[in-house]
Every structure is written in C-alpha cells, then in structure tokens.
C-alpha cells in the first residue's frame, strides 16, 4: 500500500492528464454530438441519413479501432497528427459524439408534441422551434444520460494508454513494472477513477429522479 | 421520423426539402469524391497496397492471411467473448438476486461490488489480471470482461425486476409461493424477457471491449490486423484496416439489429409497447443502443 | 417471423462455426526442414529429469516472440522464424524432438515469467534479458547472445549520435518495458512516447512525429534492415544478456541447456543459426560464455 503514497505525485500527474483528456474530448464530443443530433431531426433526408450513419458506425466500432485508424492508418493518407494527447482527444471526441447525439436526440423526442405544435402555430421556423422551445426543455431530461456518457468517456480515456499517452493507466503500467507487479499499484489507479465516476454516477441518478418527479 | 418538430409538409415545402436534400447529398458526395481523389493521389488504391488480400508477397498465401485474420483473429475475439459472456451473466444474476435481499446491511456488499466495477475502466481490470494477478493474456481479457459486465448485467436485471408490476409478486405470495419460488417462477422469467434486448445490446459492448485485448497482447482481431501490417509492411494498413473494421461492423451491426428485433418482438408478444433497450452504462465499448432507431 | 427466426438460428450456427474453427488452429503447414540433426539421437537422460520427460513425450512447448523481426517472427501462415526460433530447434533436436513436433506459444514480454511458472511452456527463448529480479521467479540458461539498448533514427537525422543527444527529443518505446524504465531513470530529459509494440513506433519515426526509437540493438537492427531510411546509432548503452527461461528450481534442466549451448557454440551450429537469421543484417559476434550461476 505504501507504493501508492510513495508515488503520489506520479499518480497525480497521470490523473491530471486523464482529467484533461476527459475535459477536451468531452467538449469536442458535446459540440459534434449536438450538431449530429440536430442533423438527425432535420427535415433534409440526406443529412438525416448522414447523421444516422455517423451514429451507427461509431457506436458499433470499438474505440480501440478508432485509435488504430488515427495512429496507424491515417498516416497512409498523409494525415499526420501530433502523437499522444491531441490524437487521443480527437479519437475520444469523435467516438463519444455518437453517444452524445443519441442522448440529445432522445431528449428532443421526449418533449411533448404539443410544445412543438404550439411553437409552429405561432409561426416559428424549424430552427426557431428547436432553439427556443424544444431544446431548452430537452436539456433537462438530457442531462442525466449525458453525465453517464461523460462517465463512460472518463473510463474510455484509458484506451489512450495503448497509443502514446501517459495518463492514469500509463502511469500504472510504469509503476507496476518498476514495483514487480505489486497489486497495490493498480488499486491506486482504480481509486483515482472512482473519485470521478462514483460521485458523477450519484449525481446522474439524483438528477434523473428529479426529472422523473418533475414530469 | 420525428413528427414533433414539423407538420406533414405541403407541396411547396416538400419541393424545397427535396431540393435541399439533394443539395445536401451533393455536398457530402463532393466531399467524399475529393477525399477519395486525394487518397488515390497518395497511391492508396494501387494494387501494391491491396495485393496482401489476394496475392501477398513474402511467399505467403492469401488463404493464410485471411485465416490469420478471420479464423485466428476473429476466432480469438469471439472465444474471449464466448467465455466471458456466460460467466458474466451467471455472476450478474447472482449479484442481482443478492440485491433483492430484504436486509439492507446484507445487500450492501452486492451494491458495493456493482458500483465499484461499473466505475472502473475495463482495460484497468484486464491489466489487473495480467500485471497483478499474473494471468496469461487470454485469462486477463476474460477476467476484465467478466468483472465489468457482471456488474452491468446485475444492473440490467435489477432494473428488470424493479420494473415488474407489483401485482405479480403479490399474486405469487397470495397463492402461497415462498420468496424464492416467487422470484424463480414469476419475477425472474418476466424480468429476463423484458430485459433481453438490453442484455443482447450489452453483448455488443462486451464484444467491442474484447478489442482492448490489443493493448494487453491478446492476439485478437485487431492484433492480427496489426501483425499482418507489420509483417508485410505499413503500406498495407489501409487494406487490412478495411477488412478489420468491416468484420467488427458486420458482427456488431448484426448483434445490434438482433437486439432491436428482440425488442420489437417482445413488444408484440406482450401487447405492451416495446421495452426500450436500457442504457445502463456506456462501457469502454460505449453505450448499448438506447432504443429502436427512428427510421429516417 | 419464421424467416427472421431462421436467420437468428443461422447466425448462432455461424458463430459456433467460427468458434470451433479457432480451436484447432496452429501450425498445420509443416515448416520447411533445413536439415537439423533429428537423426535419432536418443541420448540417455537421468531418470525423472525434465530432459527424459520431454524426450519420452517427443514434444516440447517453446515460448517465443511472434512479432520480433530476426528473432521470433510469425507470418500469417503460423510458421515462426528467427534466431530464437533456431536456438529452440537446436535444443529440441538434442532431446531427439523433431522441429515439426515443437509447439510454439507466443510469450509477449510481460507474460514470460507467468508462462514459465504456470507450466504453460517448457522453455522460453524470447529476447529474454537475464536479470536478478527475474531470477527470483525463473531460471536462466545461457546467455546465448549479448544485446544492448540502442537508438534508431532516420538516416537523414545527424543530430542524434548517442543517448546523450536525446535530451528534449521525442523517443518512442514500449509502455512498461525495461528500455522505457531505463530511459525514464537515466535520461530524465527525454520525452518518452510509449506504444504497445515497437513496430508501432516506425511510422511515427518516418513521419517525424518522434525523433528516435530506443530498445535492444538487435530489435532495432531488424527494423533498420527492412528499410534504407532508418539507421541504428551509437554503441549500446546497456547490457542485455539473452537467456533461456526455465522453471526456477529445475537446475538440472538449466545446466543441461548450458551444456547444449556450449556444444553449439563450439561446433559452429550457433554461428550457422545466427548467419541464417539475424546474421543476414548484423555482423556475426563471438559466442558469449554461459553463466552457470548458483542460487
């Protein structure tokens, strides 16, 4: 157990990288995901199809494969990304955008039909209806699933460890090698993940209950 | 199609939407065209980037290349999933049953186990197996998949039990069944049936997560792609990637489709609206589908 | 309904098929025999020894790398090739075991001690550096080769001539490996970029995303041999004696392997094995002398 305290600063360095990955990739995924969700409910068929394909393909692809593409395949097309952190942010952001889009879309579909009908009957356009009436209401029921997506993202940042980013898992691997496979090394890593995921999970379910009561 | 946001359009709007749709399609196609032309300019579509699939260099045969990917690679992926899924299901069921205990303090360990393993990355669990518990890569991958997914399965089954109308349990008690009998003969069969689509959807996540074996040296599908790329040279990565990604998509889309079909069928059977596929958690593989996709 | 049910059944059947297909994989293509001495040399081994057991069984399980050019590399056809592979064949030959009867098992770096301790393999020949920490868990015959950590860069890069030139440079290596630990401990100014395998480092090196790759010189030589644009720079700055891993308490077997090694060092079979594999790109060294350490 001492190994955790002896290497506290190394752990914290890895933890900070994990947090930064989550924050940047989360922001990217939110922006992309909201755009894709918008396309999925748009009246233009071709855009809807594009957005649906985006979501279906990414949701059925392992995240490892997305990393594999960006790191090993993309250079064949002449696309060179700065290795490590920013590549990881891009992969995680793209991948997570599909899940954000799904959460937002089901939120939009959860808003009562009458709301949109009323909005249209006072002459609002599609964009206005979405922006002024539907989205503000959808946000409330979308937040708990979005928190769950962000929890998953936090855990998913671990995949970056296989592709040139030293975050919590990368630190854990190094310390594990240096300490002859001492199990406590990885218990320490686990503790840092739980610090994020458990409170976030509790928050999500508390919000979920509040939304359920508000209905 | 979402009908919340707009009425059935009139003729003018319909024409306008059709034009807009065509324009949108054109923009996407033009972008795709330029991307492909750019790739072609880099020689990506020349035979010497693809012949690994039909006439590989280095005295290897196409049959062994395909066998190394589809039989050994995909086989290893499916084997890990096939061993992990039933184990996770049984343990998940036990955890879910444990959580139905009436005494709170007895329930706590089960709750703790579920919350603990839900909150940790699958990769960490796999590394714990290989680095700390000295497992071989296969056991490590299976270990990681089992401990994570048993927590998710437990959560899905618990939700299924909680969603049952109370009358079912009350009726079971009324005819003199014991707690265990009621659980076994009345509650569980119904919970499993309503949650079947979610369970199948979670299998997609499990299968996707098996690709993390790539990082812990388990020779699964992605690893076989990488080994071939390394053996024959990096220029083949595009062709090999297409094969690997295609295989994953084929298997996962089939399973996702199966989950949705089950969900529709369950709905038709019980006369109730189709149970949405429950998104308990998005694994490293991501969240299971959250419901029947709206047909565009 | 019936058609979709039939589809579902077909799917399950297909999955079962793919699963059963992977059970019996392996080396079903016999490797081309290059004339090892499989001529019925059934020497007498002490009763109850590992050698007697293996000779009796007529088969041996060897752990090696499957992705290491020049040492242990397995193509899609499942046939391993390289210097480690040849050494294992020579040892098997001394037990009277034909090379077709060797069962090859992939033992990646982090899995070698475990594979020996669990008895999954009889010996490990896998660019396996002998060190005191590992001696706590396994026994080492040999060394049969002396490697050392070195640096690979682009041939056009003249800035880097040795490890001291790596300060502030991006150096690719494998996550959790000994070379990574060495870089972190002894060259703190190096920006270490860890991947899963060394081959993943090559394309970033060519593309300028990293400045160098660092690990054992022989591994790097294998990569340099395959492409003209890469070069190994400077003398090795660590010593990595490669040994053959066996069960820790099986001193008898370990000493017997040492005998075999000394024999093949002396009669030229070691040199022939080197020249047929790693020797195609590396100069032929003098054989090392084995270390018959006592616990």
Image (cartoon, rainbow, N blue to C red):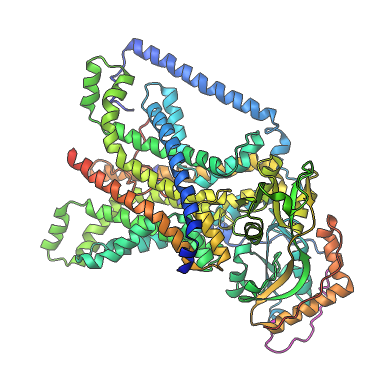
Q: Magenta includes C222? A: no
Q: Residue furthest left?
A: B174
Q: Is residue C251 left or right of residue B164?
A: right
Q: Is residue B127 left or right of residue B102?
A: right
- The percent coordinates of residue C176 (x first, y second) are 59, 59
Q: Nearer the viewer, residue C31 or C155?
A: C155
Q: Nearer the viewer, residue C16 or C137?
A: C137
Q: Which residues are magenta?
A: C35-52
Q: Is residue C289 left or right of residue B10?
A: right
The answer to whether A34 is drawn above or below residue B72 in the figure is above
User: Which image quadrant is residue A26 in?
Assistant: top left
- Count of number-bearing discs: 0
Q: Residue furthest bottom?
A: C47
Name the magenta segment's main secondary structure.
Answer: loop
Residue at x 56% of width, y 57% of height: B216
The answer to whether C169 is drawn above or below residue A127 in the figure is below
- The percent coordinates of residue C153 (x first, y second) are 74, 47
On the rendered image, what quadrant is the N terminus of chain C found in? top left
- The percent coordinates of residue A58 (x first, y second) are 47, 39
- The percent coordinates of residue A98 (x first, y second) are 43, 37
For residue B78, say whether it is visible: no
Residue at x 49% of width, y 66% of height: A3
On the rendered image, what quadrant is the C terminus of chain C found in? bottom right
For residue C166, say whether it is visible: yes
Q: Residue furthest top?
A: B12
The answer to whether C295 is drawn above or below residue B98 in the figure is below
């Amino acid at each position: 157990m001492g190994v955790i305290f002896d290497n506290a600063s190394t752990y914290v360095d890895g933890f900070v990288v994990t947090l930064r990955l989550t924050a940047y990739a989360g922001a990217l995924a939110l922006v992309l995901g909201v755009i894709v969700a918008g396309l999925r409910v748009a009246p233009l068929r071709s855009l809807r199809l594009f957005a649906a394909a985006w979501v279906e393909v990414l949701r059925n692809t392992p995240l490892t494969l997305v990393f594999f593409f960006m790191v090993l395949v993309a250079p064949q097309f002449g696309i060179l990304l700065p290795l490590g952190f920013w590549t990881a942010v891009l992969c995680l952001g793209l991948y997570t955008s599909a899940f954000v889009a799904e959460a937002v879309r089901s939120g939009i579909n959860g808003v009562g039909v009458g709301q949109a009908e009323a909005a249209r009957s006072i002459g609002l356009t599609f964009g206005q209806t979405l922006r002024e009436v539907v989205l503000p209401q959808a946000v409330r029921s979308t937040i708990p699933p979005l928190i769950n997506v962000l929890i998953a993202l936090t855990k998913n940042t671990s995949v970056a460890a296989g592709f040139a980013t030293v975050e919590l898992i990368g630190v854990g691997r190094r310390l594990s090698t240096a300490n002859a496979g001492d199990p406590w090394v990885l218990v320490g890593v686990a503790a840092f993940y739980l610090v994020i995921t458990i409170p976030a999970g509790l928050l999500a379910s508390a919000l979920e209950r509040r939304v359920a009561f508000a209905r | 199609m979402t009908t919340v946001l707009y009425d059935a359009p009139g003729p003018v709007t319909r024409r306008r939407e059709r034009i807009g749709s065509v324009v949108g399609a054109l923009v996407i196609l033009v972008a795709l065209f330029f991307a492909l032309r750019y790739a072609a300019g880099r020689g990506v579509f020349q035979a010497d980037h693809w012949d690994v699939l039909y006439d590989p260099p280095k005295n290897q045969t196409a049959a062994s290349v395909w066998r190394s990917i589809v039989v050994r690679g995909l086989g290893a992926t499916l084997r890990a999933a096939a061993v992990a899924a039933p184990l996770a299901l049984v343990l998940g069921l036990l955890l879910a049953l444990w959580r139905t205990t009436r005494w709170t303090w007895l329930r706590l360990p089960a709750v703790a186990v579920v919350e603990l393993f839900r909150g940790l990355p699958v990769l960490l669990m796999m590394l714990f197996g290989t680095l700390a518990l000295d497992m071989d890569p296969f056991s490590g991958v299976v270990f990681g998949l089992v401990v994570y997914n048993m927590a998710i399965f437990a959560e899905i089954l618990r939700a299924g039990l909680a969603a049952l109308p109370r009358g079912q349990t009350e009726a079971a008690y009324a005819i003199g069944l014991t707690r265990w009998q009621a659980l076994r003969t009345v509650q569980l069969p119904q919970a499993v049936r309503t949650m079947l689509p979610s369970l199948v959807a979670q299998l997609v996540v499990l299968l996707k997560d098996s690709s993390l074996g790539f990082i812990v040296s388990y020779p699964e599908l992605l690893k076989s792609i990488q080994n071939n790329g390394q053996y024959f040279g990096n220029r083949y990565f595009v062709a090999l990637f297409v094969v690997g990604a295609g295989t994953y998509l084929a298997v996962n889309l089939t399973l996702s489709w199966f989950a949705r079909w089950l969900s529709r069928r369950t709905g038709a059977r019980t006369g109730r609206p189709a149970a949405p596929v429950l998104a308990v958690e998005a694994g490293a593989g991501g969240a299971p589908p959250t419901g029947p996709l709206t047909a565009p | 309904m019936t058609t979709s049910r039939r589809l579902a059944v077909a799917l399950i059947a297909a999955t079962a098929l793919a699963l059963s297909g992977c059970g019996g994989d392996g080396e079903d293509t016999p490797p081309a025999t290059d004339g090892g001495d499989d001529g019925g040399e059934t020497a007498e081994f002490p009763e109850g020894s590992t050698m007697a057991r293996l000779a009796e069984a007529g088969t041996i399980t060897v752990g090696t790398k499957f992705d290491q050019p020049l040492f242990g590399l397995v193509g899609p056809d499942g046939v391993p090739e390289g210097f480690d592979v040849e050494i294992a064949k020579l040892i098997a030959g001394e037990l009277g075991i034909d090379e077709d009867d060797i069962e090859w098992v992939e033992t990646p770096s982090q899995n070698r001690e475990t594979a020996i301790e669990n008895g999954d393999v009889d010996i490990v020949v896998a660019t396996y550096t002998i060190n005191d920490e590992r001696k706590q868990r396994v026994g080492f015959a040999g060394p049969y080769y002396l490697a050392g950590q070195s640096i690979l860069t682009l041939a056009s890069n003249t800035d880097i001539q040795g490890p001291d030139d790596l300060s502030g440079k991006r150096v690719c290596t494998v996550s959790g490996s000994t070379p990574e630990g060495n870089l972190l401990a002894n060259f703190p100014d190096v920006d270490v970029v860890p991947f899963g395998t060394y081959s993943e480092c090559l394309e970033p090196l060519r593309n300028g995303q990293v400045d160098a790759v660092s690990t054992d010189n022989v591994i790097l030589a294998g990569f340099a041999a395959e492409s003209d644009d890469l070069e190994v720079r400077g003398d090795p700055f660590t010593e990595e004696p490669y040994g053959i891993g066996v069960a820790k308490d099986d001193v008898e077997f370990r000493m017997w392997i040492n005998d075999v090694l000394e024999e093949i060092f002396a009669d030229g079979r070691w040199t022939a094995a080197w020249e047929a594999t790693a020797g195609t790109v590396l100069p032929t060294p003098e054989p090392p002398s084995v270390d018959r350490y006592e616990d």
